[in-house]
Image (cartoon, rainbow, N blue to C red):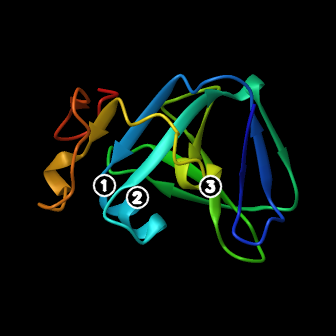
Amino acid sequence: MREARCSCGSLRLRAEGEPALVMQCHCHECQRRTGAPAGIGAYYPAGQVTVTGEERTYTRTSDAGRSLTNHFCPTCGTTVYWEAEVLDGILGVAAGCFNDPDFPAPQRSVFTVRKYGWVHVPDGAEVFERSSMG
């Protein structure tokens, strides 16, 4: 069991088991969402995730042209998780919200066409210039 939370601790998420996928995304929207050169998401089947606390949502169109809904804390603004139209029944969780230095490394790196030149892609990760979802 792992617990992710927002910066102020009001919005929490418990995830059972290991993530089905950990992905590093370099798209412009993930860069803006995180304020970092890439977003790291851990993907879990929705049935393995329990969310507690007040949240707000923001739905946008992804770089691939599909909808993506971010779930964030209304107090501190931290995006804790999201739902992507292309991944029905799967929740993406911001890996940094787990605060676990032993968290698994990304197995996939996407939208590398927008990757900052100095950002490292983990050894062995699958690399995609754009989306890996087709």
**The disc labelled 3 sits on which kind of residue?**
Cys
Q: Nearer the viewer, residue 28 or 105?
A: 105
Q: Measure the C-alpha gap from mark 3 to mark 1.
A: 19 Å
Q: Are there few (<14), some (14-19), or many (20+) residues within 10 Å of tag 1? A: many
Residue tagged 3: 97
Mark carried by residue 27:
1
Residue 46: percent from the left, percent from the top?
71, 28
Q: Residue at x 38, y 36 (%)?
A: 106
* Rendered-image quadrant of the N terminus: top right
Q: Secondary structure at mark 2?
A: helix
Mark 3 residue crowding within 10 angstroms, few (<14) / some (14–19) / many (20+): some
| Quarter residue 126 falls in | top left
> Do the CB atoms of the residues marked 1 and 2 lie less than 8 Å apart?
yes
Tell me: 3 left or right of 70: right
Q: Residue 68, position in %: x, y?
A: 53, 48
Q: Identify the residue at image location x=18%, y=56%.
A: 114
CA separation in Å, label 1 and label 2 = 5 Å
Name the quarter where the C terminus is drawn. Answer: top left
Q: Nearer the viewer, mark 3 or mark 1?
A: 3
Residue 67 appears at what percent x and percent y?
Answer: 50, 46
The single residue placed furthest to the right in the displayed view is: 53
List the residue tagged with mark 2. 30
Kind of residue at disc 2: Cys
- Mark closer to the chain start, 3 or 1: 1
